[in-house]
Image (cartoon, helix red, strand yellow):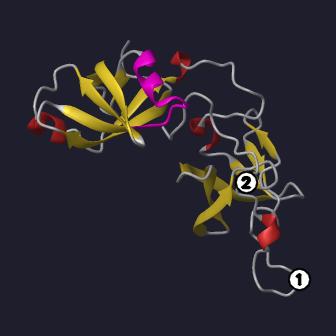
Amino acid sequence: MSKPQNPVQMAVIGAAHGIKGELRVKTFTGEPLALADYGPLYARDGRAFQIIDIRPANTVVVVRFKGVADRNAAEALAGTELFVDRSMLPDDGEEDEFYHADLVGLEVRDETGAAIGKVVAVHNFGGGDILDVTLGGRKGVLIPFTQAAVPDVSIAEGFVRVDPAAAGLVDDEDGDGPREEDFDPKGRPRGPSDAGGNR
């Protein structure tokens, strides 16, 4: 297969690991070791990467790629984003599971249906998925991707609907800021079961 026509980011290469060409890789797959199941991975410039060994290491995986045999070659790859074509991904997720790539670029609407912004990225810092959106010219507004904060997602129609209170976008009655009860850190994270990242 050549360079992906509809790329979905599966991982990003981190630091070299040891002196034999191994690399620490952050995956965006539900099961980190599943990264090896998608065949060749591709960089943005079309370079192909074939995994010949993979093992878990804390929050990342340690990977040996074909043709990367020493630390210098490994260090040169740090920061490289790895993709597969969307056609390589399973399409059997739960109804409320989405690939990060499908969410980026969606219009953000409020409870009345009015367009108020756009999803620019999806992050996960360990506590569940978070939508990074622009709202009214404000960049970097973070919204928890939970059922309460984002009750409607329509990939086909190109939008997500947010509940401003649950998303922490409105002040409480006293004007003191978002209410603590509007945040539920265990509130059903809704991320991809098998792949993610922006891609």
Q: Quadrant of the N terminus?
A: top left
x and y percentages locating residue 106 in the rendered image? 67, 45
10 Å crowding of disc 1: few (<14), some (14-19), many (20+): few
CA distance separating discs 2 and 1 = 24 Å
x and y percentages locating residue 6 in the rendered image? 50, 26
Which image quadrant is residue 152 in? top right
Front in this rendered view, residue 73 or 62: 62
Q: Secondary structure at mark 1?
A: loop
Question: Closer to the camera: disc 2 or disc 1?
Answer: 1
Judge whether residue 157 is colored magenta.
no
46 vs 154: above or below:
above
Residue drawn where x is 17% and y is 36% of the image: 74
The disc at residue 108 is: 2
x and y percentages locating residue 189 in the rendered image? 70, 45
User: Left or right: where does residue 39 sit relative to residue 70?
Assistant: right
Q: Secondary structure at mark 2?
A: strand
- First reached walking from the N terminus: tag 2 or tag 1: 2
90 vs 21: above or below:
above
Tell me the kind of residue under disc 2. Answer: Val
Which image quadrant is residue 133 in? bottom right
Residue assigned mark 1: 173
22 vs 190: above or below:
above
Q: Which residues are magenta?
A: 26-38
Residue drawn where x is 60% and y is 18% of the image: 90
Tell me the kind of residue under disc 1. Answer: Glu
Judge whether residue 33 is colored magenta.
yes
Which image quadrant is residue 52 in? top left
